[in-house]
Amino acid sequence: MRQSLIKRWAVRTALLLLVLVTVLVLNTARNAMGWQPLVDTPQQRRAVLSSGWRIAQPPGPGPHRAAILLSGCDGVHDNMEWWAARLRAQGRATLILDSHGPRGIDRAQSWRAVCAGQLLTGSERAGDLATALVALREMPGIDAHDVAILGTSHGAWTAMELMAALARPEPPPGLSAWPAPPANIAAQVGPVILLYPYCGLLSRAGGSAWPMPARGLMLLAQNDSITSPQDCRAMAQGLRDKGAALRVLTLPGTDHGFDQQERSALSPLQFDARSRDRAGMLVDDFLTGFASAPRLGI
């Protein structure tokens, strides 16, 4: 009798595990194909996101050029505020785009599904970035041209996904339509800063050329234990072959998330103030060079 119960329990457990694995595989395949059955209108997406926007202006009269910041897969933490302050020192108004809190993904460790590629992929989140770019046009004191985009990890993946999506007529997955014509959104994009992005199998960011005259800086962590710097170098080279002005630099001795102090209790990653400051200087130099370079109309 006892052996029979153990056998039935083992069979049921195996079937449950098989179902779970199947669901994960199918969901991963759905994400890789960029299919999202739950769709928002641009107005609905803006209504959701605007509750979590963190907007700050630099000193002095506007209108100010702007910057949008996108966090990693674990949501908004201290590094977003640090980078926002750095960008405000460059005279830019900052909008920290929280994709997690307004969706409830910041609760009960649910952000881990984002990090695992099961929820809110970079291609889906690109719709958030497009929505925020268009919303900047209506915000007082902000010049919505030459908008800097800075993303870390999942946020950098998101920025790259939007750059690729702007070449396609269909909107990012999960949006029923573009919030404005893609060419008009592309015309708003200024410098693009990508810190230790994800460039793996789920990424569709290398499939299309970047809109001109956008230029980017990709900062990779030499000892990245989360994402592959080699994948990003290969993707960056492919984008350069398509005409993208994208500079790639590797920070020696650094790991993923070196600029972030707030972490979950189980995170093996370490904050590295020296590398963060080095990255800050490289970003400052890139923004200064971008501002002094001639820009072409679209």
Image (spheres, rainbow, N blue to C red):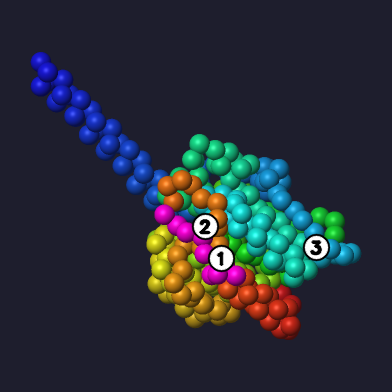
Residues at circles 2 and 1 in contact by the CB criterion of under 8 Å: no
Q: From which residue to which does the magenta span run?
A: 268-277
Q: Please tell me in which quadrant of the rendered image residue 279 appears.
A: bottom right
Which residue is rendered at x = 87% and y = 65% of the image?
60
Secondary structure of the residue carrying tag 2 is helix
Q: Can you identify the residue that label 2 sits on?
A: 154
Tell me the quarter of the image containing the C terminus.
bottom right
Disc marking residue 273: 1
Q: Is residue 69 left or right of residue 122?
A: right
Marked residue nearer the N-terminal end (2 or 1): 2
Residue 228 in view in this figure: yes
Percent x, y of residue 228: 40, 66
Percent x, y of residue 92: 76, 66
Mark 1 belongs to which amino acid? Ala
Disc marking residue 58: 3
Q: Which numbered mark, 2 or 1, is in the foreground of this view?
A: 1
Percent x, y of residue 79: 60, 58
Q: Cα distance, mark 2 to mark 1? A: 21 Å
